[in-house]
Image (cartoon, rainbow, N blue to C red):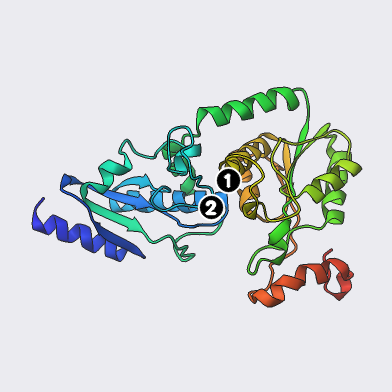
Amino acid sequence: MPAKANAEFACNVRKTPKYHLLKGGSSNPDQYFYVIQRSPGTGFFANFTYVLHHLKIAERLGMIPVVDFKCFPTLYNEKDAINGTENAWEYYFDQVSPYTLEEVYSSRNIAVSDGFWYLSVMPKYITEDSELIDIFEKYIRIKPEITALCDSYVKDYFCNEKVLGVHFRGQEMRTAARHPFPPTKKQMLGKINELVALNGYTRVFVSTESLDYLRFLEKNLDNLVCFDSYRSNKNSYLESPRPFHRYLLGRDILIDALLLSKAEALVCGGSMVSEMAIFLAGKKESYQYRIDNGMNSDYQILAGYLWYLKSMLPSFLGGFR
């Protein structure tokens, strides 16, 4: 490759915010690789949205993307291989290009994302960038064993039913700074009952990581179904109740989002999971019914208490409506 072309390549990468050039080997001297990593990352769909943004950036740079959640592990990585791979991205999706990590790292020209999120060029929610639809369709292939589980569930529980999807996020999101306040139990049940009465839904599909929330809805709703995911009243990432727990946490939330997208409508608060379901659902009319409680404080100490305070106060004193 001429020296001028190499200089232009380096210049273009440096102009794109926050990427690093890496010295590889001598293979593929005419190819330019872009390694997408986010270690340790955060939730499943935050990591996924990050990858979509960087696939778009790789295209803009004219580089070949590859997702590396092996050398740069995430919260979902297991100690042992899953279906023959140690790359957590490939637990759930096909690699985004035909090159292996070994081929990429033995190559001459490599750029690596730094793992941070820059809101100036990467909107937080997947639905905020319409260009990500084309990126998704071009690069993302969900593993067939996962889509088979989803299709089987739809056949068993969605067919001949008018399904209302519910994503009820709680747990640590109630105390997370700079995150949307999740709905309360009263708000969620009220909205579900309102929509069932108004639109005649015959089945309610619930996605929640909270065992307490699921038990509450089961007690108060008929015709409720849910996928057999792990639920707890603690932080699931800090528990190890079953073999391959972290892999299964990712698999199950991916299936939940796929199933939510196949419902007639969705009741939710603000979260990456509900945004993914909305993204996958496409342009369904009257699909989304969001309970908007505003945003938690930027200050972590205050954020740890504010949801609980607002959930107890009447609305005229600043409580949730």
- Expressed as whole percent of the image width and height from the top left, the position of residue 122 reads 47, 59
Q: Could you tell me the amino acid type at mark 1?
A: Arg
- Expressed as whole percent of the image width and height from the top left, the position of residue 202 reads 83, 31
Judge from the rendering whether residue 96 lies leftward or rightward of residue 228; answer left or right.
left
Q: Is residue 44 above or below residue 312?
A: above
The residue at 51%/59% (across/down) is: 123
The residue at 39%/61% (across/down) is: 114
Cα distance between the residues tagged 1 and 2: 7 Å
Which type of secondary structure does the marked residue at label 1 adopt?
Answer: helix
Task: Tell whether label 2 touches label 1 (CB within 8 Å).
Answer: yes
Which mark, by number, is residue 316? none
Q: Which quadrant would the C terminus be assigned to in this image?
A: bottom right
- Expressed as whole percent of the image width and height from the top left, the position of residue 7 reads 16, 61
**Residue beneath label 1, please?**
246
Depth check, front residue: 106 or 153:
106
Quadrant of residue 293 in the image? bottom right
Q: Could you tell me the amino acid type at mark 2?
A: Leu
Judge from the rendering whether residue 37 lies leftward or rightward of residue 159; answer left or right.
left
Which mark, by number, is residue 75? 2
Judge from the rendering whether residue 190 lies leftward or rightward of residue 153; answer left or right.
right
Q: Is residue 10 above or below residue 163?
A: below
Residue at the farthest left position = 2
Q: Is residue 298 above or below residue 154?
A: below
Which type of secondary structure does the marked residue at label 2 adopt?
Answer: loop
- Residue 282 visible in this rendered orientation of the protein: no
Among the two numbered marks 1 and 2 on one chain, the one whose residue lies closer to the N terminus: 2
The residue at 26%/58% (across/down) is: 22
Task: Determine crowd level at label 2: few under 14, some 14-19, many 20+ residues with C-alpha closer than 10 A.
Answer: some
Quadrant of residue 245 in the image? top right
Task: Determine crowd level at label 1: few under 14, some 14-19, many 20+ residues with C-alpha closer than 10 A.
Answer: many
- Expressed as whole percent of the image width and height from the top left, the position of residue 128 reads 55, 54
